[in-house]
Image (cartoon, coloured by chain):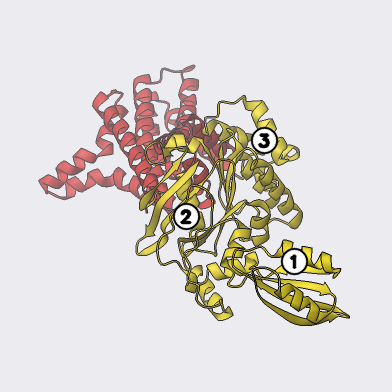
Amino acid sequence: MKAVFKREVRSYFSSPVGYVCVAAIAALYGFYYFAYVMLYGATAYAKDVYSVMFQFCMMIIPIITMRSMTEDKKNKTDQALLTAPVGVTSIVMGKFFASFFVFFLASTLGLLPAVALNFFASPPWGIIFGNYIGTLLYGGAMISIGIFVSSMTESQVIAAIGTFVISIVLMFIDGVTSNFSNEILSKVINWISFNARYDTFTNGIFSIPSAVFFISVMAIFVFITSRRVESRRWS
Amino acid sequence: MVEVKHLTKRYGVNTAIDNVSFMVEEGTIVGFLGPNGAGKTTTMNIITGYLSATSGSVTVSGIDTLEEPNEVKKMIGYLPEQPPLYLDMTVKEYLNFMYELKKVTLPKEKHIKEICGLTKIEEVYTRLIGNLSKGYRQRVGIAQALLGNPPVLILDEPTVGLDPKQIIEIRNLIQNLGKSHTVILSSHILSEVQAVCERIIVISNGRVVADGSADTLAHDLSDEHKLIARIEGPEKEIIYAVKNLEKVVDVVSLGEKEKGVYDISIEGEPDYDLRKPLFALLTRKGWPLLALKTTDLTLEDLFLRLTSTDYAPEKSFVPQKRPQVELLLDDEGETEGSEVEKTSENDEGGAD
């Protein structure tokens, strides 16, 4: 897992992908901190920064994950990975953690404006950390889904679009419950809703059940991806 | 060392390999021969654990690939047809990555240096793989297969796309590796297989159709076992004298080739080597022997014949303890050009 993780991280930063994703997220955080907090002159608007940035992050995640599995399949480098004495789950986990690392780096750089703000004002650290952790957990779950989607295709474009569509669906799925009065549908949507879990973090509350939910999603999709890769051996 | 038993792989309704069985002894170089789509790569992929078989088993040093896949993978170095290289890495980074991935326990720097020396890639060690020539990429592919010094090397068409000089270099490298490793290699280049491999396994339409050394196969597959001798001397006396040799069945003159030099076709009893008594006779009589050849099939003839649909085996091949010829072929009919062409066309659609 460690070897795959190191290779993948190196690969992100040996091409523009890693730098562009990290720089784009960091720059947007900076811009929205300026636009919301500095111009309005109220640190309470930090919550709005994260609200906007959450959507940008969900757009960038498909770009981070689109090449995870597709590139190996296309370049036949999966032959080196799958004939090495390591488990498929370890390989997928290595890739997952590498993608997550890029996202983590970008999100952490997004804290810099808040740190700078700390010299002149009192930012609402509870809200900021809540959003930061919530974004990381939601992002981690989306990354695991993105890696799964990339294992389904050899095309990076299809992988990116597929993940993007899922991310959009998950962002707006909660709205469906208000439009339909079907009780079972509402229950199912509430059960799988990412937003409902994420919202608790945005209020500065660290919700263990929500954290467990996101971590479970990550574990499930890493597992499904490894089964998917394994299933190719049997096809 | 490597034992393949009744291996079958189906892709839906298509059967890529059908009941393939063979055994490779330790320290031998075995060549996989067969047309495109014959099942060579599929067999190799199953041995390395990249693919699973529909039925059958593979054991390496007695360990089953399904029961302890990681243990088996540690014992195999694999060079697929397209080397699994990351073009965005330098050779150094790639070999270090593969070293860690394969969980090699040998001293890292020393081991990688040794392999680089063996595969002659020291001069490109710090260069990006994406900028290397095909030959160097192939060498880097072989280098990664050698990491961890695995006892079994599986090389899928290791010289494909290389220039003649590179082919000779890689061939020499494989021969050297064969001294300390069990090597299974596939190739389309018949001369290469003949030069490098001690044993040949011919696969056609997913089945093993022959298994043995090139010479043995060529001899055993020949319908006629004649010697063609070019002898200087009186034609009639030569024919008379040779006919009187023990176990000679038929002697025919093929005509005068040079002044006073005749080509004589000599047929002996099956499995009897006429060369020594013939040489002794000619020496005694003072008739110079200018050339001597057998009518055994060449490897090319052998390949065409074995991979022709007419020669598909009726039942599965059962491997023997030691390499020996097991021909499950009909003795009927000659291979005709049209039949060979038909076979090639049929084979192209299959899974390789």
Residue at the (68%, 52%) spot, across then down: B134
Establish if A1 lies above or below A63: above
Residue at the (80%, 68%) spot, across then down: B291
The numbered dot on residue B278 is: 1
The numbered dot on residue B30 is: none
Establish if B183 lies above or below A37: below
Picture coordinates of residue A194 (x, y %)?
28, 38
**What residue does disc 3 label?**
B115
In this structure image, what is the colour of chain B?
A: yellow
What whole-number distance in Å separates the C-alpha atoms at marks 3 and 2? 28 Å
Mark 1 or 2: in front is 1
Picture coordinates of residue A125 (x, y %)?
38, 20
Give the quarter of the figure containing the C terminus of chain A.
bottom left
Establish if A62 lies above or below B287: above
Mark 3 or 1: in front is 1
Indicate the chain on which mark 3 is placed.
B
Q: Are marks 3 and 1 on the same chain?
A: yes
Disc 1 element: helix
Residue at the (73%, 48%) spot, across then down: B169
Indicate the chain on which mark 2 is placed.
B
What whole-number distance in Å separates the C-alpha atoms at marks 3 and 1? 51 Å
Q: What amino acid is at disc 2?
A: Thr
Mark before the other along the chain sequence, 3 or 2: 2
Mark before the other along the chain sequence, 3 or 1: 3
Disc 3 element: helix
**Chain letter, colour red:** A
**What residue does disc 2 label?**
B42
What whole-number distance in Å separates the C-alpha atoms at marks 1 and 2? 48 Å
Q: Quadrant of residue B141?
A: top right
Closer to us: A38 or B164: B164
Picture coordinates of residue A30 (x, y %)?
49, 32
